[in-house]
Structures are given as structure tokens and as C-alpha cells.
Amino acid sequence: MSNDVATRKEVKIAKAGRKARRRNHNFSGGDRATIATFVGVPTLIHIFMVWIPAICTVLLSFTFWDGIGGLKNIKWVGFTNYRQIIQLDADFGPAIRNNLYWLAVFALIATPLGILLAYYIDKNLKGTKFYQTSFYMPLVISLAVTGIIWDYIFNSDGLINSLLGNNTNDSAIDFWGDPNKNIWVVLFIASWRHIGYIMLLYLAGMKSVDPSLREAAAIDGATEWSTFRKVVVPSLRPVNVIIIVVTIIESLRAFDLVYIINRGTNGLQLLGVLVYDNILGSSMRIGWGAAYATLLFILCIGPIIVYLYQNFSRED
Amino acid sequence: MVTGKTSKVGLRVTIGLLIVFSIVWVFPIIFTILESFRPYGDVLKYGAASWPQHLTFSNYINALVQSHMWSFFLNSVEVAVPAVFLTLFLASMIAFVLSRYESRWNVALLMVFTAGNLLPPQLLFIPLFRLYLKIPVPHFLNENGVLYDTQLGLVLVHVAVQLGFATFVLTNFLRTIPKEISESALVDGANVWQHYWKIIFPLLRPALASLGVLMTTWIYNDFFWSVVLLKSGAKRPITAALSNLQGLYNTDYNLLAAGAVLAFLPTLFVFFSMRKHFVAGLTLGSTKG
């Protein structure tokens, strides 16, 4: 592939450059200080405010701490928090279930639909600019505002109930209050946003496909659809990996949408919300919150490793 | 153009599908804009599905003046602008070193940033929240004297988290630029700072622009961190402040609609005027072949 040729060239240039530099360049004290600052400041900020808190959260999940006394009051309790959230927390089951629903809807419906729309947009039909713009718009609107926007459609005085003539009586469909309905409505809204994101990523990937591959398939008499399935999709391995990673991580991180609707209660529990609830909610259980956060972390490790492998496996 | 076989029926179905989908995508946004121009009383009387009887700007005037949406918007700007500039500046420095000076630590370091970008924010916030309650700041920043409930704290978190993505993207971007470009500068005896500032930084501009547009929308749209790290309603950025308009029992939905429109108008404007940058920013990190 053309990319590989480019990379090889780069490697050659890089190697030549490295030799030249090694010969010509001895770092002065000032240069050393500059490099140390350039690397050190961002690295320290990132490690101190991202990685160390992440590790601390994992450690906190094995402790009991009321948060009132200083750090001295932290007691090591092993897996007690995990046992307690599984056995005692009524929200644990619904949260796991909802996160799984979220993942399933994204992976089985939203992501494939995004890829399908990318395929149609790529055909450059009449009006394609308009369609594309429509699908991208939700991406620039915050999830909190997205929740408010859809509220006008779904709430009990909203458009759907109004169209059904349910405004004045008690027969209004309770989209938010019914725990058997609300998660699906939320997933519909979340998909509204996710589909455009996947489409954008896929379209960008499809631009990098060598046109001669498609032409060859067309000459062989393949239909556009089968060319897409058998030639385009398999050649987009990096994009496919990214889309899988994005799909999983986005469904685990979910927070904003359910928080703005009903603070993630009554059928809308999510792991990401329970972390928040146990720290800033009505009752503070730091160990439980940390255990929920650690569960999220464990679920994210797989996709993170896949993503790293995808991006760094070709380097020495 | 690629020529494949598509039947006429297939084409019609395709276009029909795209039109239906586009309508579902645009409709709620248009509907919210329409609602924002209707008086609440009208909707109460005739229902949400009714044809608008009166149109009014009063929801916007109320949202801007009585509900202080204008100052919440300024709060967002005060957080997003410094955070984006600081992130881009720091990320460009480390990306420059990682892509121009070989070291066996480079790949490991870049992996730390890349993985850090993918961690869920919920994993970071408990210790940061506790820490922010302990870190003292001067009283002009916060009358309680701690970092918690300050916009500075919010800026710092955004910088730390966004550094992961920005470093990853900028390093990959610089790696596609041949190192020969640097050689002449090095032969001339430029020091590391001059190499960065005179040679590399100008080359980075297009990537910085795209990344800047993208990160501004991300930080502007952030909800989680402002809910978690700010307590005072008055300090909230606009996305988080909208919930101030949500009453517990009776919400003036049309006022809320005006607030929502005010909150998404700037990002939609940025999107329409800088769409190329926005799309480029989102794909910079993902299409490295």
C-alpha cells in the first residue's frame, strides 16, 4: 500500500537524519534544559492529574474511608466494597444491564448504521452535502443540551404526546418515568449522536482507499455494495479497530444524557453515574464509588490495549 | 468516478432513506428553535404540536437578562480559551521532541498519553475532587480558598486530559513531515528552542487550527467536569447552567428552549464556518494508516 512506501521512505530519511544529527549535534546545557522542559512539563501534568488519580481510585476501591478524617483514617478492606456493591446495592444490577444495553445498541445498530450511511454518502448522490451536514450536527451539540432538545419531543407535554392528543388527560405516554421505556428512548437519542460520529470516521477512512481497487472490482462485475463489503471494509482495518474502540468506550463513559434527564435513576442507572452518586450524591461511600470506577476501568482496558496495539505495533 | 451497478429502484430507496434519516436528524433541532420563539402560555393552551399563534423574542430576553445566560456563556469562554491554548502549546512542545529527537522512551511516553486520553473521566474524579478540596488558592480566585469550585481547577483538568489526545495527534502529524526540513536549521547551528519555534511551530499551524476548533467544542460542551468540580451556580459554564432553568415542578419549557439554542448556537456556528477544521480534527487521530 502507498502508506507503507511512504513510511519506509520516512524511516530512511529519519535514519539518515539521525546519523547526521548525532555527528553534528552535541546538546548544550541550554538545549538539554529546553528538551527537559518540553517533555517534563506536559508529562508531569498528565501523569499527576490523569494516571496517578486513576491508580489512586483503584487503590481506594479496596479501602474504607468516610472522607472526613484525613488520609490516616483510610482502612484497607480488601474486596469488601466489591462484595457490597454486588450484594447490597440495588442499582448495581440495573447499571450493568443498562451499560450492556448501551453497548449492544451501539455495536449492533448504531455503528452498523453509521457505516451504512457512510457508504451511501460516499456515493456522492444529489444533496449529499445536506445529508452529511445533518448527520454531523449532533456531534457539535453537547449531550446535556441534546437531552433538553429531545425532551421537547418525548416529555409528557411534548410533541409526541401532543400529536396523540394526550396532553389534557392522564393517558400521556410516560417516556421518562417508565423504567421499561426510558432506557430505550435514551439509547435512541444516544444513537442519534453516535451514528454521525461513526459515519464521519468511516468516510474519512474511505477516502484513503486506493480507487484502483474499486475500479478493478467494478470491472470484474461486482456491484457497488459487494465491492464495499468485500473490498472497502476489509481494507480499512485501522478505521475498523478505531470504530470498535470508540463504540465500547463511549458506551462505558455514558453519563451526561441520563444525568440531565433524571440524574440516572429509575431505570436509567449506569456505572458512570453510580461513581458520581457515591461521591457527590446524598450518601457518600467513597469505597463504593471507587469500586464502580475501577469496574469501568477494567472494562476499558481491553479496548485501550487493542487501540495501542493498532497504533504502535508497527514501530520498533 | 467509480462505476458500479445500481438499479434505479435501489437509487430511489437510497435517496428516500437518506431523506428520512436527515429529517430525523434535523427535526429536533429545528423544533427546539421554533419552541424558543413561542410564549409558554401559547404552548400550555394549544399543546406542543399546535401551529404557533404568536412568535416572540421574550424567551431570549429572559434567558439572557434574567437567567444570566450571557454570563454563563462568558464562563464557558473563560474556561475553554485558556485550556485550549495551554493544551496546544504544551502538546506542541512534547510532540516536537517526541518526533524530532530519538530516544528509547519516546514510544512508551506516547503510549502513556494515548492511553490516558481513553480513560473514563469517572476513573479520575474521586482523587482529584478530594485533592481540589485541599489545594489552597488565593482568595480572589475563590472565597473558600481552595481549588475546588474554581474555574482554574476546571482549566487544569481539561488541560491534563486533553493533553493525551493532542500529544498523540500532533506527534503523528509531525512524523509525517520529513525530517530533512529540520536539517538546514541544525546545520545553521540553531538551538532546540529555535528549531521548535522557527521551523516546527509554523509547520504545525494547520494541525493546531483543526485541533483547536475540535477541543474548543469539546471543552465548551463538557458537562461532567463542571458538574463535579464546581459548586456555585454562578460559576457554571453554559452547558451545565442550563439545568438552572429546569424547574423542579414547573419548567418554562420555552425559556429552556431559548437557553438551549443559546448554548448550541456558538458550536453550530463554529461547525458551519469551520467545518473542514472540525472534521479534520476528529479524523487526525484516527486515520493514521
Image (spheres, rainbow, N blue to C red):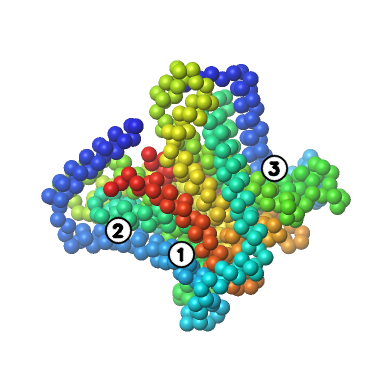
- Label 3: which residue? B31
Question: Which residue appears at 40% of the width and 53% of the height?
Answer: B114
Q: Position of residue A62 (x, y in %)?
A: 51, 72
Please check whether the numbered discs 2 and 3 fall on a single chain. Answer: no
For discs 1 and 2, the disc positioned in front in the rendered view: 1
Q: Chain of mark 3?
A: B
Quadrant where the C terminus of chain B sits is top left
Please check whether the numbered discs 1 and 2 fall on a single chain. Answer: yes
Task: Mark 2: give few (<14), some (14-19) or many (20+) Cα within 10 Å.
Answer: many
For discs 2 and 3, the disc positioned in front in the rendered view: 2
Residue A54 numbered mark, or none: 1
Answer yes or no: is residue B12 visible. yes
- Label 2: which residue? A38
Question: Which residue appears at 61% of the width and 57% of the height?
Answer: A96
Q: Position of residue A284 (x, y in %)?
A: 60, 73
Q: Amino acid at mark 2?
A: Phe
Q: Amino acid at mark 3?
A: Phe
Give the secondary structure at mark 2.
Answer: helix
Give the secondary structure at mark 3.
Answer: helix
Task: Mark 1: give few (<14), some (14-19) or many (20+) Cα within 10 Å.
Answer: many
